[in-house]
Amino acid sequence: MKRKKYLVMIGLLSLFGVVFLGGCSDILLFHPKGPIGDAERFVIIVAIALMLIVVIPVAVMDLLFPRKYRSTNPKATYMPKWSRSAKIEWVVWLVPAVIITILGTLIWHFTVHLDPYKPIDTGVKPVNIEVVSMDWKWLFIFPDQNIAVVNQLVFPVGVPLSFRITSDTVMTSFFIPQLGSQIYAMAGMQTRLHLLADEPGTYLGQNQHFSGRGFTGMHFKAIAVSPKEFEAWIQKVKQSPDKLDPARYQGLEKPSVNYPVSLFSSVTPGLFDGIIRKYNKTMNMNPRVVKEASESIHLKTGVSEGN
């Protein structure tokens, strides 16, 4: 009878594990498509496995001990005959110490190895991309090709991507989960990121930092294509009748949700650096003006659909 109860308990725990972990197959972080994402998946899995060394035994004891030493079971009266156990002390202190040491070493190594500012050396010239976070859309500028795209990022497979990232609104977070390395976009500042895709495909790109009422729609498609297809896509963009000049950019600045993919055949030189400089000028003003400028940015409420 007792054996049957234990088998039932083990079965329930196994069922719980299957249900709980079943959703992991849909987690994008566990399906990386580049070396950065693959290394970060390894760190996540190892960290979870190390923590389960403590979590699983504690969970099992939480279920077994109350049942065995319950008040209605007189045969299992708990009468300890010791005041201190060297074996338990060793387990309680040594196991966590070993786990923390391994985790610390692992995190230190990969923090240096996966530094988002560190270029990816493959012997291939990287594609330079300037990213501007807006309300509530993403602007991608390709300075070497002198083109720009809104809410779509196309890039070649096997070629490193060198990002310069800033914000023309509140703080946001630039993230392509299957390629790895989430990093913030901040007004008046520039952050860097280097990624690489190993295989062609369409991946989700998104903002992971709440930035207002249009936050849920602030995502884009990151499309990895062959180098030949990438060159053809560049020529397609260059044929667009739209140009990203100061007047057109002022239109993009207006808050909008579900903004359609837009192609620009040319870009005003220095646009990205100019976006950063305009906030630096504000920061050099007196505190009262800085406060008013900050409030005006945070209190944007006008929203339009599409254009």
Image (tube, rainbow, N blue to C red):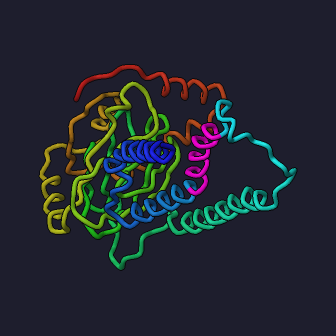
**Residue 297 location (% of width, % of height):** 48, 28
State the residue in front, 230 or 112.
Answer: 112
Please count the marks in the image: 0
Q: Is residue 153 above or below residue 242?
A: below
Which span is picked out in magenta? Answer: 53-68
Left of 56 or right of it: where is 145? Answer: left
Single out the residue that lies furthest toward the right: 83
Q: Is residue 162 above or below residue 204?
A: below
Q: Residue at x 32, y 40 (%)?
A: 219
Left of 127 or right of it: where is 55? Answer: right
288 drawn magenta? no
57 drawn magenta? yes
Q: Quadrant of the C terminus?
A: top left
Q: Residue at x 77, y 61 (%)?
A: 87
Single out the residue that lies furthest toward the bottom: 123
State the residue in front, 79 or 250.
Answer: 79
Dominant SS type (magenta):
helix
**Residue 138 location (% of width, % of height):** 33, 42
**Residue 234 location (% of width, % of height):** 18, 58
Taking the image as drawn, is residue 276 in sight? no
The quadrant in which residue 305 appears is top left
State the residue in front, 275 or 194.
Answer: 194
Left of 29 or right of it: where is 156? Answer: left
Q: Residue at x 85, y 52 (%)?
A: 82
Q: Is residue 255 above or below residue 187?
A: above
Q: Residue at x 49, y 67 (%)?
A: 118
**Residue 141 location (% of width, % of height):** 32, 52
Q: Is residue 86 above or below residue 270?
A: below
The quadrant in which residue 86 appears is bottom right
State the residue in front, 125 or 61.
Answer: 61
Taking the image as drawn, is residue 227 in sight? yes
